Image (cartoon, helix red, strand yellow):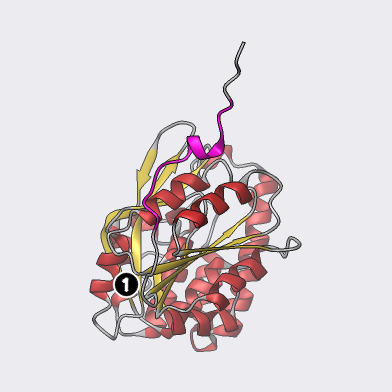
Amino acid sequence: MLRHTVTLDALLPRFPVMTNMPHPLVSIGMPIYNGEEYVRDALDSLLAQTHNNFELIISDNGSTDKTEQICRWYAARDSRIRYVRQAVNRGAVANFQFVLDEASGQFFMWAAYDDLWGPHFISDALTVMEDQTIGFVFPTTILKSVHFGIYRKIRKSIFQFIETDDANKRVLCFANIHQSSHKCNLVYSLFRTRIIRDAYQVQDISSDLLLSMVALKKSKGKVLGNHCFYKRYPYLWPGFKKKILIKRTKRMRFEMERDQLMEKAKFLFPEIKESLEFIRANHRASRYHRGFQIVKNLCG
């Protein structure tokens, strides 16, 4: 009896080989570790972008699954992809830093290996940033459960404040939005590279909340309202459970982390430290006002 062996090459989609691209306008950095289950979908959605003048830098933190094989397959067929395998697992912070340091484009975005993007995201974001006063474009988010097939849309109006010219107001409004808004996805915006590099020198990805606040201090942004970013979770996203289901130990950990982050935020933004302390005092694991505000109408 003859046995037919199915190879990885046969399972993956067919793309035309991309060669001789001009100097990239956009750099996409994808830190990855053991992402074989989701990375194909992420890469497909990035390669399907209508704007194609980009480089995609994949930094593999020493994966032990088929991540390397999959990424090398894609890189062999598209010259925009540069795959780098780290000799040892450097940790997430260093891996995020690596892809940012390697970027050569005028614009930069991080791409998580398990997320998806609508095909017009980069193109639409670049059109917005023809306005030189805009430092980044934040796509409104859809939270999606891969296993259950359910999703939730986050409203554009929640983040309208990032478009104001007042830097302190941008930071304060961001701090005053509850974590259940999934506000820290702001780090997956398309940035002007110089802005996110400057922000990363102040605060790294170990706190995406503080990194977002630093970026907001440096520049105003723009919100895209067509829900072109899909933040995917294997099962349920954080904050899905009701207040009554949150364990006491988890609540205590939340409060400890909240206090630590707010202390550092007060150090980074001393000019609004009293308002930040007021927010901290009212911030609870599952309590917020309509529109995810922690303190209602704090920012006017």
Residue picked out by circle 1: 161
**In this rendering, is residue 203 above or below 231?**
below
| Residue at 65 percent of width and 41 percent of height | 247
Magenta segment, principal secondary structure?
loop
Q: Within the magenta stretch, is there residue 65?
A: no
Q: Residue furthest bottom?
A: 271
Q: Position of residue 38 (x, y in %)?
A: 52, 44
Q: Position of residue 26 (x, y in %)?
A: 39, 72
SS at circle 1: helix
- Along the line of sight, which residue is nearer the eye, 201 or 13? 13
Quarter where residue 277 is shown: bottom right
Please indicate, yes or no, whether residue 300 appears anywhere in the rendered image. no
Q: Which residues are magenta?
A: 5-17
Quadrant where the image shows the N terminus: top right
- Along the line of sight, which residue is nearer the eye, 22 or 229? 22
Q: Is residue 187 left or right of residue 101?
A: left
Q: Amino acid at mark 1?
A: Phe
Q: Position of residue 24 (x, y in %)?
A: 39, 75
**In this rendering, is residue 74 above or below 257?**
above
**In this rendering, is residue 139 above or below 127?**
above
For the residue carrying disc 1, how many other residues have a C-alpha within 10 Å: few (<14), some (14-19), or many (20+)?
Answer: many
